[in-house]
Image: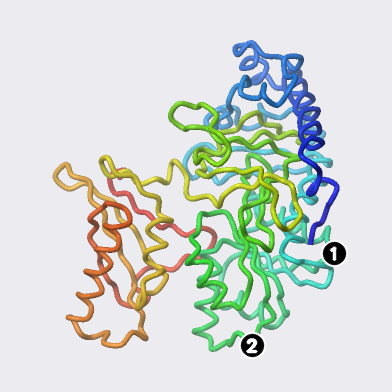
Amino acid sequence: MIWNPKYESMDRDSLSQVQLERLQATVNRVTRNVAFYRVSLATAGVSGEDVRGLSDLPRLPFTTKDDLRRSYPYDMFAVPLRDIVRIQSTSGTTGTAVVVGYTRNDLKTWSECVARVLAAGGMTEHDVMQVAFTYGLFSGSFGLHAGAERIGACVIPASTGGLEKQVRIMRDFKTTALACTPSYALAIAAAATEMGVRRDELFLRVGYFGAEPWSEELRRRLEESLGITALDNYGLTEVLGPGVSFECERREGLHVNEDCFIVEVIDPSTLQPLPRGAEGEIVLTTITKEGFPLLRYRTGDIGSVTDEPCPCGRTLARMSRVQGRIDDMINLGAVKVFPSQIEQIVLDFKGLEPHYEIVVDRVKGIDTMEVRVEISGAMPGLDEMKSLEKIRARLVSDLETATGITAKVTLVEPKGIARIAEGKARRVVDKRQL
């Protein structure tokens, strides 16, 4: 279902005009009200009057997460604090937190964008959505919550926590839609199995997953275990939260809400724009945000973009699913690999559980990688060392063929790898940084 045909199905020429007008207004606003942009735009020799077409976008300076950290807490706000009605922030686990402010209009825009995400999965006022993201300064839970309420659906703010609690809520409250990270959904599915809760006891039909890269094989596992259609959606707290882009029922890329964001792809090494279809770093410019507008924000996420129309009827540009983040890339000498690439191989391997951990270390000056994977308790011949060695050797071979890395593979007993308690899974342990 298309929530807002006016913008989601607008012809490309009209959409480009909307983007240009809003971009010009945004550049003028940040020049007046944000010292960082006043300096960076002056340094680049660009003003709002110089932006006469979308082709002028590359003339604008980039914004990085380090820029936002240095502005902590309020220096990037483009309105007085009295006009800010909501504050969210990043976790700050990898440095100073990024504090984001929303005006009343920003919250309306946010709920509009997320309503499009949810409607694309068929959500209506008859649905019951269980939001299993953490409620707090993290933006995901509140954005999804508001979007569902805008549609008129019933919202269960389950947050995170005990997996058995999630399963009981899902069954007893007749949840039809689940929103959380894909790794947390996998843990919920495993808990349901352990509790003896069958698929036909649940009312689930759709899952809205995001906040971490995930593979097609993990999508298949989630759909089989929970009996749902699993949809990807994308957003960042710095840019908005969930609602930047989303999959429709065709699942042929994520539609970007282009009336609110301009998306580019750049070469992360040269910082030069790449043509449509080329893979590189996703860069986003907000063109409707009042409280915390951003010009050419380097997301660190790797993907590609196409302007080809989707069979669903939307004309919005589509992002590929995010393959990984620049800062999540595992560098082993000349070889680079994303955890999602390893996940695809592990989850496609019969006889193994979808629980794994990648351990990177440096031994005598040489980088090494170990992939620890759980063995399925239901696998025939679990106690036979010969059978286990054959599985281990095949996995080593598959990983080397796909990535070029000769990894050590360790098979561990069922439940030998810690389950996530809440939020995002931690798949990589890099001992070189300790």
Residue placed under numbered mark 2 in the picture: 200
Q: Residues within 10 Å of mark 1 (few under 14, many from 20)?
A: some
Residue at the extreme left of the image, as rendered: 364
Q: Is residue 251 left or right of residue 342?
A: right
Residue 403 seen in render: yes
Classify mark 2: residues with Cα within 10 Å, few (<14), some (14-19) or many (20+).
Answer: few
Q: In the figure, 325 relative to 168: above or below? A: above
Q: Which corner quadrant of the image does residue 70 belong to?
A: top right
Q: Position of residue 291 (x, y in %)?
A: 75, 34
- The residue drawn where x is 64% and y is 37% is 263
In space, the residues marked 2 and 1 are separated at their CA atoms by 26 Å
Label 2 sits on a secondary structure element that is helix
Q: Is residue 330 above or below residue 354?
A: above
Looking at the rendered structure, the kind of residue marked 1 is Gly
Give the labeled residue for mark 1.
Answer: 152
**Closer to the N terminus: mark 2 or mark 1?**
1
Q: In the rendered view of the protein, which quadrant contains the N terminus?
A: bottom right
Q: Quadrant of residue 59?
A: top right
Label count reads 2
Please tell me which residue is depicted at 80% across the width and 45% down the height of the picture. Answer: 109
Residue at horizontal 79 percent and vertical 25 percent from the top: 25
Residue 133 seen: no
Q: In this picture, is 182 found above or below 109?
A: below
- Relative to 162, say whether 100 is above or below: above
Give x and y (percent) for residue 240: 68, 43
Residue 429 percent across, percent down from the top left: 34, 53
Q: Which mark is residue 132?
A: none
Q: Given the image, on which type of amino acid does mark 2 rest?
A: Asp
For the residue labelled by badge 1, is the local secondary structure a helix, a strand or a loop?
loop
Q: Which percent across, then down, holds residue 93?
A: 49, 45
